[in-house]
Image: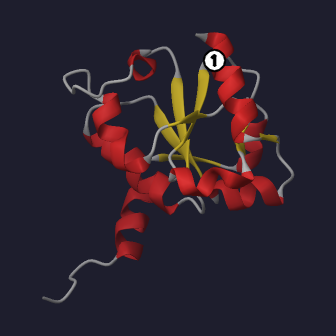
Amino acid sequence: MPITKGYRQLVDEAMAEVTTYSVEQVRARLDDSRLQIVDIRDIRELGEGTIVGALHAPRGMLEFWVDPASPYHKPAFADESREFVLFCGAGWRSALAAKALQDMGMTNVAHIDGGWADWTKAGAPTESLEANKARRKGKA
């Protein structure tokens, strides 16, 4: 069966419909308590670290963690006063994920253009997975 719509078209369509921030736009808001950065990369991609203060929500579980009716729901996603800014390795998966969450009814979701690759290239703040876990544990 031939593919009738490739990944690039899906990503382009998502990018046209979701809020997209540059690394610098997000970096400027790191101290904003209403901002929740969400790392949707696979656990195997986290060896290099993550964005400071990011919540890890693997792409494969995201919709389940967001939906209050799901047995896998995570209360962190129920805070409607926050903006959830997703990122992945290059900004493709996060665009698709942000679109999926918008399709679910979320209006407080966006993503970072260029993802982790552009974030690290810009020298923006990162932390190890261990430091991230310790920081999150301290908030519990």
Display colour scheme: secondary structure
Residue 17 at what x, y percent from top left?
Answer: 39, 51
The front one of 17 and 100 is 100
The front one of 130 and 29 is 130
- Left or right: 83 as drawn, with respect to 32: left
Q: How many marks?
A: 1
The front one of 126 and 43 is 43
Residue at the extreme left of the image, as rendered? 1
Q: Which residue is mark 1?
A: 137
- Left or right: 28 as drawn, with respect to 21: right
Q: Residues within 10 Å of mark 1 (few under 14, many from 20)?
A: few
- Compared to 113, does 65 lie above or below? above
Query: Which corner quadrant holds the N terminus?
Result: bottom left
Residue 5 at what x, y percent from top left?
Answer: 26, 77
- Compared to 75, does 126 lie above or below? below
Q: Residue drawn 64% across and 21% down?
A: 136
Say which amino acid is labelled 1: Lys
- Left or right: 33 as drawn, with respect to 63: right
Q: Residue drawn 61% across and 25% down?
A: 35
The front one of 44 and 68 is 44
Q: Residue drawn 81% across and 60% down?
A: 121
Residue 50 at what x, y percent from top left?
Answer: 69, 44
Residue 88 shows up from this direction = no
